[in-house]
Image: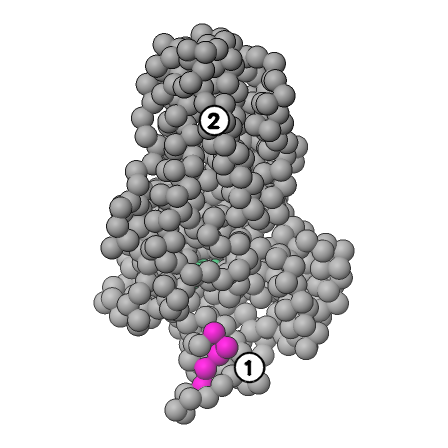
């Protein structure tokens, strides 16, 4: 099995982390954990984007030197990985020495291949997006011009190096054609294709009006355009320019996870830079949608930024992780509503999954002295519970590998609901007196089903599923997908159960 390389965007350190950052990384984390569960070798990278005018300005506003400022804010993003339970293998900062070396090596390689020339840039620039815009993309309000993202633009005129992006249009279109899954969801593909077909200009890739960036090799009056610098992080972390580095085998990336606002950089500029440097482009870029807060656009000026730390403190980590991936189809925009989170927590996690676990495990505890009953051949009545378990890992795997997280959770919970129906109909509590042998069989089947649900849910809710697997008596080395084929022995002792999810009473 080939190794898997998954990345998040590297986050601007102009401000503290919010729900949008947590969301992109969460999706990456779940897929990384899934692949590991399936026995694959995985590298999951995240980090911080620390150069450019926007960060320099944020440091100035904070009255700090840029390096001290970025050290402090970058740490907040590192802390977020712990708070959210992310299993990243690496954390990269663009102010690291290895990254300067990689950027300069890539620049030199592009220059040697005739892909860079010196000119002058004159046009519109949005510092908030760190992006150049054509005049036809702008709208004007009260004498101020705005980019489609809503960011104000300013007129820039300075000497600049250019990358021959225009020469790569056909190669990019051909790459999308040959790799139909490169841009996902597929609805975003046309957007990118029509942007290219409307005409690609060469890209300004250096700035001279400020200093906070990676110096251009051989011409230190210029610093590199922050997006060229930032995108390079994905190969810096794999050891570039040393293509014999131990991690280089992970390149090209399997999936770059990004928000829809930064798709253009990842699906156009990045593969063009790589092709121009004769390096393989990434295999896939997935652009997810944006969250609103109770129907409103999230913005600092509206004061409605959602702090992931506060959410986790209030609801617990796993309910937040579950909600974010269950509520909204990945790829679409969605609304964050407290009421919706509370409903999912109470109505699905506690009432459906928690309840099934609690009923099953309490009965094993009470009626079987905490000893796991023997495996048994399924009767006809058990088919509805047991048959769908066989294909569960494969079904979930297919959905996750196409980033359809909500459908994966829907599928799992449809089965958990079915299991609740099974326990109600079989009523093992009543069988205790009438047919204790059948009671033991029913409880064993329920145990088998719960083990399968908990196993495939681990990537989504690592903490509570570890607790459930503990309660099911599944040893830590028997929690992979492959281990599902190995039944636990009869008489295996189970610890006393305790509730997995705490219900939240009020919507507040
Ligand atoms: N630094 C660049 C990325 C460079 S990658 C080589 C950047 N950083 S960012 O901090 O501004 O944004 C990072 C991610 O957060 C983006 O994927 C963006 O889509 C996401 N989100 C920001 N606000 C969001 C929401 N309200 N909802 C969902 N995601 C959002 O861009």
User: Rounded to the nearest whole Å, what is the CA distance between mark 2 and mark 1?
Assistant: 59 Å
Q: Which residue is mark 2?
A: 423
Q: Earlier in the sequence, mark 2 or mark 1?
A: 1
**Mark number, residue 231:** none
Q: Residues within 10 Å of mark 2 (few under 14, many from 20)?
A: some
Residue 201 part of the magenta-drawn span:
no
Residue 341 in percent (x, y) is at: 37, 51
Which residue is depicted at the point 65% across and 59% down? 186
Residue 119 in percent (x, y) is at: 58, 79
Residue, far front? 434
Q: Position of 171 compared to 120: left or right?
A: right
Q: Nearer the viewer, mark 2 or mark 1?
A: 2
What residue span does the magenta drawing correspond to? 145-149
Image quadrant where residue 245 sits: top right
Look at the image and tell me in which quarter the C terminus lies: bottom left
Q: Which residue is mark 1?
A: 137
Q: Nearer the viewer, residue 79 or 428?
A: 428
Q: Residues within 10 Å of mark 1 (few under 14, many from 20)?
A: few
Residue 408 in percent (x, y) is at: 55, 43
Q: Is residue 47 above or below residue 33?
A: below
Which residue is depicted at the point 50% across and 32% down? 421
Whether residue 237 is visible, yes or no, is: no
Q: Position of 379 compared to 170: left or right?
A: left
Our reading of the magenta stretch's main secondary structure is loop
Whether residue 506 is visible, yes or no, is: yes
Q: Is residue 398 above or below residue 198?
A: above
Q: Position of 308 compared to 189: left or right?
A: left
């Amino acid at each position: 099995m080939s190794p898997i390389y998954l990345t998040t965007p590297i986050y601007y350190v102009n401000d503290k982390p919010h729900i949008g950052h947590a969301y992109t990384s969460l999706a990456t984390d779940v897929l990384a954990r899934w692949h590991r569960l399936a026995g694959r070798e995985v590298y999951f990278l995240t980090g911080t984007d620390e150069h450019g005018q926007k960060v320099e300005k944020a440091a100035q506003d904070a009255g700090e030197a840029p390096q001290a400022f970025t050290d402090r804010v970058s740490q907040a993003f590192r802390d977020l990985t712990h708070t959210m339970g992310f299993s990243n293998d690496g954390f990269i900062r663009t102010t690291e020495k290895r990254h300067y070396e990689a950027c300069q090596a890539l620049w030199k390689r592009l220059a040697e291949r005739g892909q860079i020339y010196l000119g002058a840039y004159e046009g519109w620039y949005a510092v908030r997006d760190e992006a150049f815009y054509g005049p036809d993309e702008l709208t004007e309000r009260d004498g101020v011009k705005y980019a489609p993202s809503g960011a104000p633009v300013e007129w820039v005129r300075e000497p600049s190096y250019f990358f021959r992006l225009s020469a790569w249009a056909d190669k990019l279109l051909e790459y999308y054609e040959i790799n139909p899954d490169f841009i996902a969801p597929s609805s975003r593909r046309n957007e990118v294709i029509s942007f290219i077909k409307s005409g690609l200009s060469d890209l300004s890739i250096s700035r001279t009006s400020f200093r906070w960036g990676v110096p251009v090799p051989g011409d230190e009056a210029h610093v590199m355009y922050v997006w060229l610098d930032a995108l390079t992080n994905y190969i810096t972390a794999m050891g570039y320019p040393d293509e014999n580095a131990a991690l280089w085998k992970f390149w090209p990336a399997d999936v770059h996870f990004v928000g829809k606002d930064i798709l253009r950089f990842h699906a156009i500029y990045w593969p063009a830079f790589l092709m121009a440097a004769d390096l393989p482009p990434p295999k896939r870029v997935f652009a997810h949608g944006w969250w609103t807060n109770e129907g409103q656009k999230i913005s600092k000026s509206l004061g409605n930024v959602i702090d992931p730390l506060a959410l986790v403190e209030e609801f617990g980590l796993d309910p937040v992780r579950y909600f974010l991936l269950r509520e909204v189809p990945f790829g679409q925009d969605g609304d964050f509503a407290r009421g919706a989170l509370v409903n999912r927590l109470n109505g699905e996690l506690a009432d459906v999954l928690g309840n099934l676990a609690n009923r099953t495990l309490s009965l094993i505890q009470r009626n079987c002295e905490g000893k796991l009953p023997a495996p048994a051949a399924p009767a006809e009545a058990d088919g509805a519970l047991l048959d769908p378990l066989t294909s569960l890992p494969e079904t979930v795997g297919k959905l996750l590998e196409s980033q359809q997280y909500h459908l994966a959770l829907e599928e799992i919970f449809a089965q958990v609901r079915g299991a609740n129906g099974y326990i109600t109909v079989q009523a093992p509590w009543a069988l205790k007196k009438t047919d204790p042998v059948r009671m033991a069989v029913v409880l064993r089947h329920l145990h088998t089903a719960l083990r399968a649900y908990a196993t495939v849910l681990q990537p989504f809710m690592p903490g509570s599923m570890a607790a459930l697997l503990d309660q099911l008596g599944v040893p830590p080395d028997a929690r992979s997908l492959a281990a599902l084929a190995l039944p636990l022995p009869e008489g295996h002792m189970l610890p006393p159960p305790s509730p997995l999810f705490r219900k939240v009473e009020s919507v507040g």
